[in-house]
Image (cartoon, grey):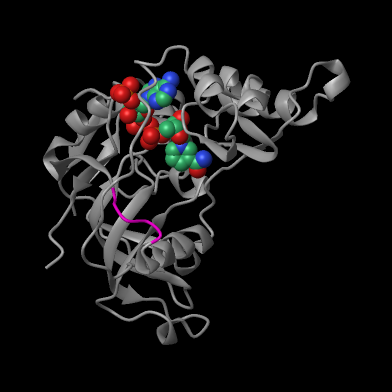
Amino acid sequence: MKSWTATARGPPTPQSLTLAASLPLPTLPPNSTALLLKITHVALNPADLVLLRALPPWLPFRRAPPVPGMDFAGVVVAVGDGAGLSSSFAVGDRVCGALGLAAVLRGEGTLAEYVLVESASVAKMPLREGWGLREAVIDYRIHDPLEEHLAQKFGEQQFDAILDCAGSQALFSHSPRYLKPEGKFVSIVGGWSQGVVPFVRNKLRPRFLGGTPRRYDLFLLSSSGSIAKEVAGWVEQGVIKQAVIDSEYPMEQAVEAFQKLATGRARGKIVIKVASTE
Ligand SMILES: NC(=O)c1ccc[n+]([C@@H]2O[C@H](COP(=O)([O-])OP(=O)(O)OC[C@H]3O[C@@H](n4cnc5c(N)ncnc54)[C@H](OP(=O)(O)O)[C@@H]3O)[C@@H](O)[C@H]2O)c1
């Protein structure tokens, strides 16, 4: 099967990423609770870039060369025979989810034609037609500094919650000016310097030592499948009205897709189409 492999550590280039034409097809072991998926789409995630840059491809505990990619959509082509799995999944089901870090560290990522995925990490694809339109946005480049603009515009009518997808310390430090006292600030930006250090500082520093008097949380994706199932439900119920796609690349152009991701300027998800959904 075709599969992208990380052949050198570093930024995404034709040297660090190679399209292997004939890697062996993964097979389900006996009593497995996994599914064999034909991958149709992979959505790139900045965490993929961190792993490409940080992890050497020769780690001894994983197969060589490692396959990158975490987030996936695909079709079930074989169901493991363990734990009554066949009552929950059938060949032909369209599914989606995200692999856990452990699978990616083992080099068993999703940027391949076929992947074995633990059934617990998988949600059935939501069925919904007719996406709606987005709400209005505040452009942070026009209103710079953003926190001053928010304080002026939302000082009276404060927010109930803020979800920070950029990892902005200033946005949290100034939040008492525009976030309700009982409001919650949630950052999704992980990583040692952006995620862990701010988390410790913002979560644990008491107010009398200068801590910001608002609740701070760090949300990190888990591969349990519960998040994928919840999000699939939101799509079906119409809570999520639009999937924002920046661009779609064919399987052969994954390097270009990663390079677009590395600009930090994507407007929505960058998707690699691995195969047709037919
Ligand atoms: N917690 C989790 O489970 C989880 C899951 C997925 C992603 N993440 C993390 O979430 C972050 C965002 O992910 P992503 O996929 O959206 O990354 P991305 O594709 O790199 O985000 C690019 C977008 O961010 C905007 N942007 C850049 N700097 C900004 C700033 N200072 N303020 C507001 N917007 C800014 C850009 O807008 P302009 O081009 O207009 O500047 C662009 O639209 C990353 O750090 C990623 O690692 C966490």
Residue 11's spot in the image, x, y percent?
A: 32, 21
Q: Can residue 129 be seen in this view?
A: yes
Q: Does the magenta stretch include residue 240?
A: yes
Residue positioned most to the right: 208
Q: Does the magenta stretch include residue 273?
A: no
Image quadrant occupied by the N terminus = bottom left
Above or below, 170 relative to 122: above
Image quadrant occupied by the C terminus = bottom left
Q: Can residue 58 be seen in this view?
A: no
**What residue sits 64% from the left and 23% below the top?**
177
Query: Magenta segment, principal secondary structure?
Result: loop
**What residue sits 59% from the left and 26% below the top?**
155
Q: Give the range drawn in magenta.
A: 239-243
Residue 168's spot in the image, x, y percent?
A: 53, 22
User: Who is closer to the viewer here, 193 or 104?
Assistant: 193
Residue positioned most to the top: 144
Residue 268's spot in the image, x, y percent?
A: 29, 38
Residue 272's spot in the image, x, y percent?
A: 21, 44
User: Who is closer to the viewer here, 239 or 159?
Assistant: 159
Above or below, 92 relative to 263: below
**What residue sits 28% from the left and 71% below the top?**
127
Quadrant of the displayed image that contains ligand 1: top left
Residue 137 is left or right of residue 40, and the answer is right
User: Who is closer to the viewer here, 193 or 169?
Assistant: 169
